Image (cartoon, rainbow, N blue to C red):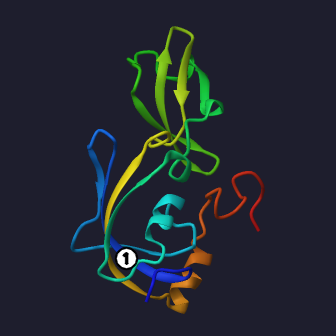
């Protein structure tokens, strides 16, 4: 069976950046599984896998536009310094996790002065070329309960629903 919409797919993968730094990989004893076409993976990974069959391997690069996008200037925020503990030593490139209306939000300190901390809330991989080395371990029809679980576990992702900008049903 070829990888197509509504197929259950499991892969072994290694993800690296242009620097050749490996930033993620699957555990060979536990391949990464997902329903193809259900917005569970980035568009570029899906495009790279489409049409492949069990046992096939491939290496491909995902451009930022089909990965996590380019850094968005609107996601740089100025946060008053007094919203941080006064004795906290804050430096550029520090990473914090804060609570947002839709759950945890990661932010990286772009710059800091006595009055303001400039926070970058872009995805950490925004602007990066993503180099995948994948092997397709399994391709099969998704089972009814797997498809049902997608509906029950729908998260707040811009590509899967509009709940980040409106109220979900």
Left or right relative to 137: residue 77: right
Q: Is residue 4 visible?
A: yes
Name which residue lies at 43% across and 89% down. 1
Image location of residue 132, percent across then percent down: 35, 58
Query: Which residue is drawn at the image coordinates 59% and 23% (left, top)?
Result: 79
Q: Secondary structure at mark 1?
A: strand
Extreme-top residue of the structure: 114
Q: Note whether 7 is above or below 162 in the view shown.
A: below
Q: Give the mark count.
A: 1
Indicate the position of residue 157 as horizontal and vertical percent values: 61, 58
Residue 135 visible in the picture: no
Occupied quadrant, residue 134: bottom left
The residue at 46%/62% (across/down) is: 45
Q: Which residue is situated farthest in the left direction here?
A: 29
Q: Nearer the viewer, residue 120 or 23?
A: 23
* Mark 1 surroundings within 10 Å by alpha-carbon count, few (fewer than 14), some (14 through 19), many (20 or more): many
**Residue 9 as seen in the image, left or right of residue 25:** right
- Side (left or right) of 55 relative to 151: left
Left or right of 139 in this view: 159: right
Q: Residue at x 46, y 16 (%)?
A: 86
Disc 1: which residue = 10
Q: Nearer the viewer, residue 32 or 153?
A: 32
Above or below, 54 against 108 in this view is: below
In what quadrant of the picture does the C terminus appear? bottom right
Between 101 and 91, the one lying in front of the other is: 91
Image coordinates for residue 107, horizontal then vertical, percent: 49, 35
Q: Is residue 168 above or below residue 87?
A: below
Give whichever of 94, 83 is nearer the camera. Answer: 94
Q: Position of residue 25 (x, y in %)?
A: 28, 59
């Amino acid at each position: 069976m070829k990888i197509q919409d509504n197929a259950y797919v499991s892969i072994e993968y290694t993800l690296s950046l242009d620097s050749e730094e490996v930033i993620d990989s699957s555990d060979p004893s536990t391949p990464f599984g997902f329903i193809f076409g259900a917005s569970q993976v980035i568009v570029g990974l899906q495009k790279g896998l489409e049409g492949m069959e069990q046992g096939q391997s491939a290496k491909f690069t995902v451009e930022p536009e089909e990965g996590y996008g380019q850094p968005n200037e609107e996601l740089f925020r100025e946060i008053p310094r007094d919203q941080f503990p006064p004795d906290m030593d804050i430096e550029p490139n520090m990473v914090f996790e804060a609570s947002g209306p839709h759950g945890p939000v990661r932010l990286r300190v772009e710059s800091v002065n006595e009055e303001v901390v400039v926070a970058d809330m872009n995805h950490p991989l925004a602007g990066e070329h993503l180099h995948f080395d994948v092997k397709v371990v399994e391709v099969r029809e998704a089972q009814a309960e797997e498809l049902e679980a997608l509906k029950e576990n729908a998260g707040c992702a811009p590509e899967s629903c509009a709940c980040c900008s409106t109220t979900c049903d």
